[in-house]
Every structure is written in C-alpha cells, then in structure tokens.
Image (cartoon, helix red, strand yellow):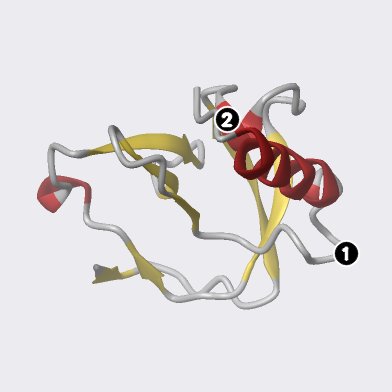
Amino acid sequence: VIRAGRLMHGKTSMIHHDGKTIFRDLVNPFEATRYHSLLVNRANLPACLEISAETAEGEIMGLRHKTLGVEGVQFHPESILTAVGMDLLRNFLKLEAVGNRR
C-alpha cells in the first residue's frame, strides 16, 4: 500500500473492470465514489491476486484472489454517486448464495 498522488475523498473516478464475478453485466467503465488517499502498489502485488478493476490512470480499484474466491474494491459501491453499486452488491450476493466465483 502506498500514498496516492492525489486525495480522492468524496470524488469519483471511472472504473474499468474485467466483467467477471462482481462486475458481471455492469456497464464498463462506470463512475464510482472514492474516499481514500492510499493505493495498492502494483509493483508489490502478490502472484495470487489478479487485478479486476482499475482507473484509466492505472490505479488498482479491484482485486481478486485467483483460487480462494475473495474479492475487494477500493471504492464505495454503497455511495449514491456509484450508480451501479446496488448491481455490484447483488452480483456479490449471488456469488455467495450459489458458491460460484467464476
């Protein structure tokens, strides 16, 4: 984890994603709300993680463990400014209910 070059508290970014799992059937890119000043350092990313979403500037906004089915995002899907947030959360709940991660 490293400090971001700019603060993103209450600001939005366009998020580009891979269309898998929690991002299935979401518009690409979509606008999402951010509230942070830290980023994942791409240079130190473990081989067990894959990037599932990022900004146009290459800031990592989503990670997925390659075998464990664990995912994380670096934006706020619950925010009113993230229009596809409820769809993303629905996708997450469907994955959990079915036990299907791909």
Label 2 Cα crowd, 10 Å radius (few <14 / some 14-19 / many 20+) = some
* Residue depicted at 75% across the width and 22% down the height: 25
At a point 61% along the width and 44% down the height, the residue shown is: 96
Label whose residue precedes the other's in the sequence (2 or 1): 2
Could you tell me residue 78's position as x and y percent? Answer: 77, 64
Q: Is residue 53 above or below residue 72?
A: above
Horizontal relation, residue 60 to residue 17: left or right: left
Mark 2 or mark 1: which is in front?
A: 2
Q: Neighbour class for label 1 at 10 Å: few (<14), some, many (≥20)?
A: few
Q: Quadrant of residue 91?
A: top right
Going by the numbered disc 2, the residue's amino acid type is: Thr
Left or right of 78, for residue 52: left
Whole-number angstrom distance, CA of label 2 to CA of label 1: 22 Å
Q: Quadrant of residue 20?
A: top right
**Quadrant containing the N terminus in the rendered view:** bottom left
**Measured from the top left, where is residue 92 in percent x and y?**
66, 44
Q: Nearer the viewer, residue 13 or 25?
A: 25
Give SS at disc 1. loop
- Residue located at (68% from left, 67% from top): 11
User: For this rendering, which residue is in front, 70 or 59?
Assistant: 70
Depth check: give the residue in front, 90 or 51. Answer: 90
Which residue appears at 51% of the width and 42% of the height?
55
- Rendering coords of residue 77 (x, y %): 72, 57
- Horizontally, residue 100 falls left or right of residue 78, namely left
The residue at which mark 2 appears reads as 21
The amino acid sitting under disc 1 is: Ile
Residue that badge 1 annotates: 80
